[in-house]
Amino acid sequence: MTDPIDRSTGDQDSSSEADSARSADSDQDTDADTETPPTSPPDLDDVVLDNLDTGSDGSDEASRGLFDDLLEGEPIFENKEVLRPSYTPHKLPHREEQINNMATILVTALRGDTPSNILIYGKTGTGKTASAKFVSEELETTSQKYEVPCEVEYINCEVTDTQYRVLAQLANKFIDKNTEVIDDRVAELDDLRSRAREDETALDGTEFTGVEGIDERIESLEEDKAGFEEVPMTGWPTDRVYSSFFDAVDYHERVVVIMLDEIDKLVEKSGDDTLYNLSRMNSELENSRVSIMGISNDLKFTDFLDPRVKSSLGEEEIVFPPYDANQLRDILQARSDVAFKGDALSDDVIPLCAAFAAQEHGDARRALDLLRTAGELAERGQTDQVEEAHVRQAQEKIELDRVVEVVRTLPTQSKIVLFAIILLEKNGVHSINTGEVFNIYKNLCEEIDADVLTQRRVTDLISELDMLGIVNAVVVSKGRYGRTKEISVSVPTEETEAVLLSDSRLGDIEDVQPFVQARFDN
Ligand code: ADP
Ligand code: MG
């Protein structure tokens, strides 16, 4: 099995895990807890007896099982997996043009020549990964059909983000493939040898004149195989990793397409050495040829590349524009036909999800998340139809999840600044200015023994919070008194405060009241 296919199944587990971890509170299992009837759950014996006793009228709430309520509603989903990010659809509406462009460039590989390198650009959720995986699966299937040696390797550079790791991963994949090729070949030769021992004419038309020739060939293949050495995930000098990779690729004739998804993350983290090395390989390879397909969310990432890498990598460029609301509708419609039961969606659900996601730079991932979450909310509410209201709730929930995630991962100093702003707002201070924030901030820092930054730095942190959409800081003119910033919190205060206090350092802050008072004393 080829790698892109492996990955997509691998992804399926890991990202659905990640997914459920992130939105654990929205998941069915957790649900069961919150939906438990207030009476204590029956113990096992009761349940069993209850089930046996068919005469029971079922009106006794205490005897109801943990899952009874949940099962009662009509099921909403037919196949929820289809709405998860890990699912690779086989039909990608509104990406025909991009897919055809890719195929037109890559078909060269099936003719045994090296395809141009391709750079794919587009914002998140515009279908780049899905389209690239689809094309790579088709390419490999066709290459098997026509028995042309062509392989695609997919690497997600957000996960594999250093030159060492990229090369090591590629080296090991090719070593595995070479081992497979050798094993197959040895099995064939073994078979031929047995037949030749019974009847010499079995060798007619082969390159061998006697059984000894076959023995030698098998021995030499086995030696090759014994010489392959897995690259460890750390520890080797990079040039050794590179030459392992190089030798593994060049072991036999083939065209190799290396897909580097989220390539901007690799360059951001580790520079462009990897791309430089990969893009120069072809002049040194003897048997094989390499072509690179880079996928980037960042339209400007090539600005950071060495000009030689830039021109080599960008031989062909394909842009994935954002989807508009109508296109998102089509995408959602196609998926929902498989994901939901017959009439589970009321008419306005898909248009509303599409409209919300179109505002979110035409992100199909967001559209699918909304639809799935709306379905889950409906399921939890035990209604048999997903309504417009569920979509609105889903939108709020996703937005809140995003805020929680952003706040949770803020650096400590930013958390203290944000906490100061929240305290002021909770105490009814309006038009909060930077000086006020700074005073509270300073007190909080002293309380938890954190370094106190300068007011200038704190102003910068406030601007960062503004850019993240957590606070809103507008510059207002105070006439001849100059200009000042008016700061307000633009996310739900209670939830945000709870996230801040769950940080072990901020959690130490007890009874914050005096600090707020301190502001007025100053
Ligand atoms: P990107 O890689 O550009 O960030 P993805 O390819 O991961 O975006 O797409 C995000 C989600 O939207 C995935 O679940 C994908 O299957 C889905 N998707 C994107 N474009 C389409 C499309 N044209 N048709 C069907 N599903 C799509
Ligand atoms: Mg992607």
Image (tube, helix red, strand yellow):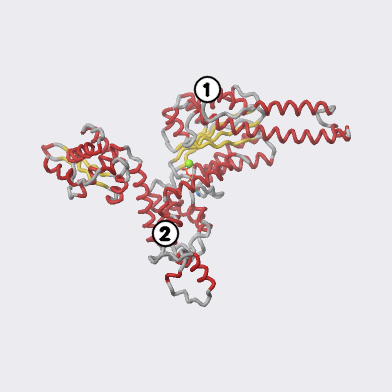
- Closer to the camera in the image, 363 or 439: 439
- Closer to the camera in the image, 121 or 55: 55
Q: Position of residue 336 (x, y in %)?
A: 50, 57
Res. 46 mark: none
Of the two numbered discs 2 and 1 in the rendering, the one whose residue sits closer to the viewer: 2
Residue 206 placement, left or right of 253:
right
State whether residue 472 is above or below residue 308.
below
Q: In the image, what residue occupies the spot 39% across and 46% down?
A: 361
Assign the C terminus to one quadrant of the image.
Answer: top left
Res. 237 mark: 1
- Earlier along the polypeptide chain: callout 2 or callout 1? 2
Q: Amino acid at mark 1?
A: Pro
Q: Give how far apart the Cα atoms at labels 2 and 1 are.
A: 52 Å
Q: Is residue 364 visible?
A: no
Q: Position of residue 62 (x, y in %)?
A: 42, 70
Among the 4 quarters of the image, the one containing residue 186: top right
Residue 193 placement, left or right of 397:
right
Q: Is residue 485 visible?
A: yes
Res. 33 mark: 2
Among the 4 quarters of the image, the one containing residue 299: top left
Q: Position of residue 324 (x, y in %)?
A: 42, 49
